[in-house]
Image: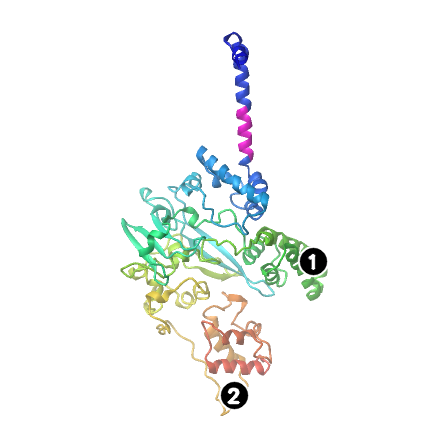
Amino acid sequence: MQRMFSWFSRRRWFVSIPLLLVAGIVAYLAIYSLLEWANSTEFCGTTCHVMDPEYTAYQSSFHSRVRCAECHVGPGLAAEVEAKWQGIRELWLNVTQTYEKPIPSPVESLRPAKDTCERCHWPEVFYNDRAVEIVHYAADENNTRSNTYMLVKIGGGTEREGQGRGIHWHIQNVIEYVALDPQRQEIPWVRADMDGELVTYVDVTSSFEAADLEQYEVRVMDCIDCHNRATHVFRSAEQAVTEAMANGVLPSDLPFLYEQAVERMGATYETQEQALAAIGTITEFYRQGYRGLYAERAKEIYAAAERLQEMYRSSHFPQAEVYPETYPNNVGHSEFPGCFRCHDGKHLAEDGSSIRLHCNICHTIPKTFAESEAVPDVPFQSPPQPANHLDSAWMADHRYIVDETCAGCHDMQTFCANPNCHGHSWPYVDLSVISPPFPLPTPVPVGPQPAATPLPTRTTEGTPSAAPSFSADILPMIESKCAVSCHSAASALGGFVAADYAGVTAAVVPGDASSSRLVQVQQGEHPAKLSPEELELLMHWIRAGAPDN
């Protein structure tokens, strides 16, 4: 030791100092390179963690050029040390193959959004609203396309900038909540700062007791409470096929392609190999059922099958038990509760008001049109609303107070029959907690109404005395119940068009009423049901061979 200190004496400073500098630089570069490698996306996705599903989804996401560490670690030495310490455990789980399947979500150790997301997505920047087009394809031979248009009120900004409204109002204002499940889907308690006043809302259908609040974690809402799948998105079969057809990646003119693709991709398989083999059989569907088409477009059909297999690989991972339905996506409310976790009509305050459940809080009323129709005018701003429209219980109450005055702003024939609202089932919404139960009173008719279809006279046996006429009896009856609500030529919900003989008979098996889809739907739970007499008349027409008379 004495010799070493002696060597680094002042007599050899011209040698010792440069050596120390070189050694320090080499050590720094080595440590820096090691940390850079350990923070690289390839290391996170393929070496340290078992992340095949997440890594695959990440590569085609909006954040594919953002390193994993920028969100999952965040800035600062303390965050770096904490992440690497946690990484030792995860590396051990990887080596011993004892990790959970699927990987639990959300990540409890994820840094707050203000330390990660908001480094790029600055809350004070005004985001602006935007018009969107949502494409739908029907499960019919023509893959009939319809387009839904609306203005999404993204909002953004802060009160200081004269903004702070729209969907990003949730970030401008402090909102606290309690979740009962790990994935934060069941939220029975919410407290929000409403113009300087703290208001507490409780799900009145839940067993949650406010007195037990201390037993739960009270979280402050931030970006990832809605954007919880901002990067690792596993698309459902319906979503993936729709996007591919709309973008021209899959040919929309191959008969029944949407139906066949969704059916195969949405089925349950034990292994990915089984799934890919089943998806590949779509070529046989065309070879056997459309021989002429197959002969002309075999190469395109096989390319479509390969594309579907590729899409399946990116969202379905049987070996990791990860599927599109594994992780809820809280943006929107089409496939998961999302917004309806709180805006469900069940979260009430002490004064009886509820968290607002209004279609036009976050977007304008959607309008759906056939592909052949012109794009409608979508307003850049929502018009002023009457005071009663702003009431928190308006969605529950508006059904009971519809009258002729509504026609001053609304086209009642299309507004009240909007398939985007009334043509869907919303299982997470319960309007009955703040409004009277069914049955609903009949709204006051607006404008000229079609005359009721007279039923043929009936014999004592209860069957019509003559075969019904399609043009005089069946079509007017079906139009009055179905076409005005969901199944017009413009909306064609579910691919069924109740506007002409071809449209009606597409859901009918002539001579066999019990096997006819139209009868089966009417015999089940359906919002627009025929009366028993009308249903019997329809079945008699079908048994007679469904003539075009």
**Amino acid found under the numbered disc labelled 2:** Thr
Up the image or down, 400 lies above or below 168; here it is below
Up the image or down, 294 lies above or below 223; here it is below
| 3D distance between C-alphas at marks 1 and 2 | 50 Å
Characterize the local packing of mark 1: few (<14), some (14-19) or many (20 or more) Cα atoms within 10 angstroms: some
Q: Give the SS element for disc 2.
A: loop
Segment tinted magenta in the rendering: 27-37
Q: At which x and y percent is residue 216?
A: 37, 52
Q: At which x and y percent is residue 156?
A: 38, 46
Can you tell which of label 1 and label 2 is closer to the viewer? 2
Q: Quadrant of the C terminus?
A: bottom right
Q: At which x and y percent is residue 482?
A: 48, 72
Magenta stretch, main secondary structure class? helix
Q: Earlier in the sequence, mark 1 or mark 2?
A: 1
In the image shown, does 523 or 318 lie closer to the viewer? 318
**Amino acid found under the numbered disc labelled 1:** Arg
Q: At which x and y percent is residue 94?
A: 57, 44
Q: Is residue 283 left or right of residue 341?
A: right
Q: Residue at x 44, y 59 (%)?
A: 366
Residue annotated with mark 1: 297
Q: Residue at x 53, y 17 (%)?
A: 20
Residue 76 visible in the displayed image: no
Residue 28 in the magenta stretch? The answer is yes
Q: Residue furthest top?
A: 11
Q: Residue furthest right?
A: 295
Residue annotated with mark 2: 463
Q: Give the SS element for disc 1.
A: helix
Characterize the local packing of mark 2: few (<14), some (14-19) or many (20 or more) Cα atoms within 10 angstroms: some
Q: Is residue 20 left or right of residue 126?
A: right
| CB contact under 8 Å: marks 1 and 2 | no
On residue 227, which mark appears? none
